[in-house]
Amino acid sequence: MAESWALEVRDLRKVYPHRPPVEAVRGVSFRVAEGEIVALLGPNGAGKTTTLKCILNLVKPTAGQVRVYGRDHNDQRFLYRHVAAVLEGNRNIFWRLTPRQNLETFAIYAGVPSRLARRAVERWLHFFGLEGLNRETRHLSRGQQQKVALAAALVRETPLLALDEPTLGLDVEAKRDLVALIRRLAQDEGKTILLTSHQMEVVQALAHRVIVIQNGRVVVEDTPDGLRQLFAAQAYVLTLRLPPGTDLAPLAARWQARLEGQTNGEVRVRVMLPQAAALYRLFADLEALGAEVRSLTPDMPDLEEAYLRLLGHPPPTARYPPTSTL
Amino acid sequence: MWALFWTALKKEWAIMRSYGLNFFMQFVTLILVFVFLYFGLGYVGGGPKVSQTQEGLMVGYWLWVGIIMSLSNFSWNVMQYAQQGLLEQLYMTPWRLRGILAVEAAASFVIYFLSNLGLLLFFMLITGRWLRLEPVTTFLLYVATLLPGYGLGYLLAGLAMRYKNIAQLFNVLQFVMAGLLTLPVDRYPWLNVLPFAQGVRMLITHVRHGTLAWQFPWPAWAVLVGQTLVYFALGLTLYGRLENAARERGLLAHY
Ligand SMILES: Nc1ncnc2c1ncn2[C@@H]1O[C@H](COP(=O)(O)OP(=O)(O)OP(=O)(O)O)[C@@H](O)[C@H]1O
Ligand SMILES: [Mg+2]
């Protein structure tokens, strides 16, 4: 049933012949089903872009296999009729052409027959609300340019779309706008999308599946919810009644405790445990402090926290305010 | 295929219009340089040969402008594309990068040929020397002379891809090409392994003696066609290698 996979990547490796050689991708394997949105998530230099470009055959892989709709990606005619990409955000379009001229040029260059091309141009201009923009693309806003770049990829009418950091450098509003449009591409237009990002909220909002990459390897592969649940049992919110003047610093150091709030003599503290069983040791510590536990609830971390823990970084939120005044 | 060419033509034209002022200033500069050379020659030279030399200058300079413009457009495009990640986008087409570059080169060739005709008319107007040019012969010789240049263009494109900034190299090449145009191929026929000079000779002969395209001896044409084939093959082969090297190193886009 190889046909049902839009993309299959097997043991992909890339060593850039640099001095010294750079091992950017060290054996990455994954698959993307038709209609799926899959995100490659990872810190800077993890190898996301390299993975994407190897798939697209823009960078020659050192080893491994890539199949797009069942066909090896070295069949480039087939490849480029089935996948289109936006790689450098707003940059890979003609800046001195209008959005319409850009779309017309890219459609014909991509080998779309003239009549279909005309229809595709109208369709995607309309989809992104770019019809009225008759200025050269370089004069448009960053968000608009990003849309032009996306539309210029979409006029090729390929079923698979590869997007490298599609929301990089956009302001909050433009980002939200674009995220909604990308979601519609999958939902309403049936596109299969492989994207990279290190913006957690984007991944959380878009992806059906997240592939976390670090140091050129796949660390974990799961749904955004699954990834969060992986750690859900290990974060708890405690309501405590403390003797006046208790120093919470030892708690902060050992359990990454964070003050969530305080109301009439009770404090709410969020703690992270290395594993669920450590709860008993936490209780021992609390007892030593003379704290009385009023309630205990498991807490869902957000994806960002889950992700950072996965990569072995302490969550950035595990800071504790000086609270000896408690 | 026609749609592709037409699209490239519209695109090149739109971009040139967008650079309108630059484009215009380029022409002004070229005209000024020409005027300087032409009338300067009149003062320095003297004697009966001057008028013939001036004719040669006019034809030679005109072809040089054609070559420089087409080539600089070609390699400048590639440098620009490399910086904008456009090489990757153009690579991801059924025609591959080299196909798209060829079509764009053909499109801008047409635009430059027409604007160069305008330039030549202007030269004739300000010098008052009306060259007898038969359109078909002129066109054929212009094309045949410039074509080998595109082999070189592909080489430059490959170098731009692999080594990014080749502006310096290009500046040097402009002068090398001016030299190539004036090689004494009459006296030393083996110099014909180098491009351009033969075409210039033939065009000058055409202007002076009214020799038409089909009246030239066949070896003259054989040289032009041979050069085109050889330089194209050479340029494309080297380009292919450089493109592969760039892909191996992840250099299609700016790294
Ligand atoms: N063309 C190249 N030549 C040599 N090394 C490269 C090249 N491109 C990337 N690298 C290196 O390969 C590694 C992976 O880079 P890559 O761009 O794939 O990471 P990334 O996950 O996309 O990072 P970012 O989030 O910064 O975009 C990095 O160490 C990078 O410096
Ligand atoms: Mg990247």
Image (tube, rainbow, N blue to C red):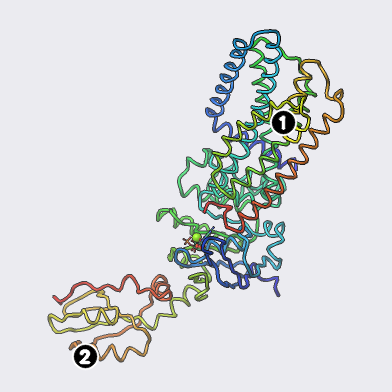
Looking at the image, residue A170 sits to the left or right of residue A68; the answer is left
Instruction: Pinpoint the chain carrying mark 1.
Output: B
Residue A133 vs A41, above or below: the answer is: above
- Residue A287: assigned label: 2
Which residue type does callout 2 highlight? Glu
Percent position of residue A85, x then y = 59, 56
**Residue A242 placement: quadrant:** bottom left
Which residue type does callout 1 highlight? Phe
Q: Residues within 10 Å of mark 2 (few under 14, many from 20)?
A: few
Asked which secondary structure carries label 1, the reply is loop
Of residues A61 and A131, the one drawn nearer to the viewer in this rendering: A61
Same chain check for tags 2 and 1: no
Of residues A4 and A16, the one drawn nearer to the viewer in this rendering: A16
Q: Is residue A104 visible?
A: no
Quadrant of the rendering where the C terminus of chain A is positioned: bottom left
Looking at the image, residue A101 sits to the left or right of residue B221; the answer is left
- Please name the residue that numbered disc 1 is placed on: B196
Closer to viewer: mark 2 or mark 1: 1
Looking at the image, residue B215 sits to the left or right of residue A68; the answer is right
Percent position of residue A97, x then y = 56, 39
